[in-house]
């Protein structure tokens, strides 16, 4: 039977679809505490549907002390009172489905909160039944940490527990102890977490730091990174050879996939994984034992905004995706700098066209559709634990987590009646959803047009990717499916360039008529 939510019945929904990430703390507050909540998500889902996205990924909503703003989970099967309760979640899910949107939750398997009852039990004694659910080790002979591993947030990855005389491992904060996926009972308990939400009707998961979840047997020291220099994050002092990307983790991804595959309706698994192409591709698993559907590809965030570099990166990535896999592209997130801050507002329009015309499932991040740029965070308002632990090297994440400005006419941009937990973008009175609603030339309208065109054009959703030659500064490619072909020409510079294009312009990033044979400064066009 055809799936009523599927726009392209020949391919699973997530191939032609677009994912929109909501960071619930900063989407919409309804109770005046300055932090977004699930009732706010429910009230604003129509924005996502009107934009033309197909699925929403919600960053964590689970009970949490919020040491890492929800990525420290104290109960995997409930909702933090700050966000609402399970009934509020069910209303979000029902509303999403009414609007034709899928809903993905954030599954955080590498670590729990140190307040999770499992960890409280584990640290209570060396003989606790759940001792082995986390990674405990004796001190090194000198009494120091068991090995040289460094936390992703800086400092040793080991925390001393005086009461039981051992260290526990934490790849992130000490308040985020790593779970031991080699323990079968822990594994079974976590698979039950997936079942709990799948049975409730969620359409899949974004899996947090998936490549971290298993560590090499014996926990050997990680090699020193010869390229490290002061001014970059402490994590990079070492190469995470033994703490990440272990073969056993791939087997667990395959287990997740078997479990979700037993449910109807193409439930989706997206893995957060930072690796080079060849190793990223292995996370698709094999045709007989598939892993995640989409191992996140962050290269549009990591690479310089340069046409030649991007052309190479796109071609290499596209070629690295196995036949049984499907590509994907991410340009923003709650962890990454804002795209408009990185490349400027004019190029952010070109970036939107790139993201939404490449071969592969795009993930959009809330606020990028209105081009939120740099948001200065005064030192006294920094909340991100990563920035607090390693200040001043440009890795702060608060700048991308500022509240959604819904309207320029209401207090706090309509986000909250109370003081928002992070400052708003300084230009919120003019850069808001409602302000852009009334301006046909706005970023919001460009995103809608791009998503609309994508949906109406199977070649853009599902077609092949063929690079085209272009002059310096121009990224050009063709997407083709059967008889349908569209070409994309993106001028990544602020100068006029001569490009031999002709045909019917389906969409331009600029107002006004495109001129065949030319690209205006900062112009991107899609041509039939
Ligand atoms: C992921 C999340 C990030 C979090 C980290 C630890 O990278 O995206 O926000 O801090 O995992 O859970």
Image (cartoon, rainbow, N blue to C red):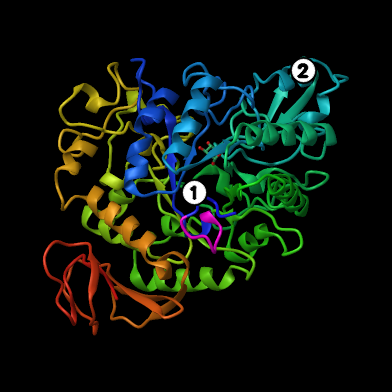
Q: Residue furthest left?
A: 512
Picture quarter with ligand 1 = top right
- Quadrant in which residue 41 is drawn: top left
Q: Nearer the viewer, residue 384 or 511?
A: 511
User: Is 54 within the magenta?
Assistant: no
451 vs 185: above or below = below
Q: Residues within 10 Å of mark 2 (few under 14, many from 20)?
A: some
The answer to whether 137 appears left or right of 393 in the picture is right
The answer to whether 78 appears left or right of 409 in the picture is right
Q: Which residue is the site of mark 1?
A: 5
Instruction: Please tell me which of labels 2 and 1 falls first in the chain.
Output: 1
User: In the rendering, at what x and y percent does residue 446 appear?
Assistant: 25, 55
Q: Residues within 10 Å of mark 1 (few under 14, many from 20)?
A: some
Q: Nearer the viewer, mark 2 or mark 1?
A: 1
Image mark for residue 121: 2
Magenta span: predominant SS is loop
* Residues drawn in magenta: 7-13
């Amino acid at each position: 039977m055809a799936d009523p939510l599927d726009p392209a019945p020949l391919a699973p929904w997530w191939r032609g679809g677009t994912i929109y990430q909501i960071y619930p703390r900063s989407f919409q507050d309804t109770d005046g505490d300055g932090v977004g909540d699930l009732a706010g998500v429910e009230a604003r889902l129509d924005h996502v549907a009107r934009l033309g996205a197909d699925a929403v990924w919600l960053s964590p909503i689970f009970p949490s002390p919020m040491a890492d703003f929800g990525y420290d989970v104290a109960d995997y099967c409930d909702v933090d009172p700050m966000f609402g309760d399970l009934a509020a979640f069910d209303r979000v899910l029902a509303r999403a489905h009414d609007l034709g949107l899928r809903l993905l939750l954030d599954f955080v398997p590498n670590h729990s909160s140190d307040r999770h009852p499992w960890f409280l039990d584990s640290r209570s004694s060396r003989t606790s039944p759940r001792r082995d659910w986390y990674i405990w080790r004796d001190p090194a002979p000198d009494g120091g940490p068991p090995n040289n591993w460094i936390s992703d947030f800086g400092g040793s990855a080991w925390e001393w527990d005086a009461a039981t005389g051992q260290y526990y491992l934490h790849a992130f904060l000490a308040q985020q102890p790593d779970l031991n996926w080699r323990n079968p009972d822990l594994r079974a308990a976590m698979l039950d977490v997936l079942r709990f939400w799948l049975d409730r009707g969620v359409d899949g998961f974004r899996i947090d730091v998936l490549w971290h979840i298993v560590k090499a047997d014996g926990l050997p020291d990680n090699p020193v990174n010869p390229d490290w220099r002061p001014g970059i994050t402490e994590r990079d002092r070492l190469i995470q050879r033994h703490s990440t990307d272990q073969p056993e983790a791939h087997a667990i991804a395959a287990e997740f996939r078997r479990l979700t595959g037993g449910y109807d309706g193409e439930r989706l698994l997206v893995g957060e994984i930072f690796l080079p192409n060849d190793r990223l591709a292995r996370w698709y698993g094999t045709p007989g034992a598939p892993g995640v559907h989409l191992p996140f590809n962050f290269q549009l965030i990591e690479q310089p905004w340069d046409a030649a570099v991007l052309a190479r990166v796109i071609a290499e990535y596209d070629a690295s995706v196995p036949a049984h896999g499907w590509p994907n592209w991410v340009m923003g997130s709650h962890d990454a700098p804002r795209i408009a801050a990185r490349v400027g507002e004019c190029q952010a329009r070109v970036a939107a066209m790139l993201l939404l015309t490449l071969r592969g499932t795009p993930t959009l991040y809330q606020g990028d559709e209105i081009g939120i740029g740099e948001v200065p965070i005064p030192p006294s308002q920094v909340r991100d634990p990563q920035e607090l632990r390693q200040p001043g090297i440009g890795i702060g994440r608060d700048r991308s987590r500022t509240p959604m400005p819904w309207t320029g006419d209401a207090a706090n941009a309509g986000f909250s009646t109370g003081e928002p937990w992070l400052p708003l973008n300084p230009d919120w009175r003019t850069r808001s959803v409602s302000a852009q609603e009334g301006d046909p030339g706005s970023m919001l309208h460009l995103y809608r047009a791009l998503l609309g065109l994508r949906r109406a054009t199977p070649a853009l959703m599902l077609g092949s990717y063929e690079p085209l030659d272009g002059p310096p500064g121009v990224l050009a490619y063709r997407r083709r499916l059967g008889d349908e072909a569209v070409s994309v020409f993106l001028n990544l510079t602020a100068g006029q360039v001569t490009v031999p294009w002709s045909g019917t312009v389906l969409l331009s990033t600029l107002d006004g008529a495109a001129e065949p044979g030319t690209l205006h400064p900062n112009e991107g066009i899609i041509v039939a």
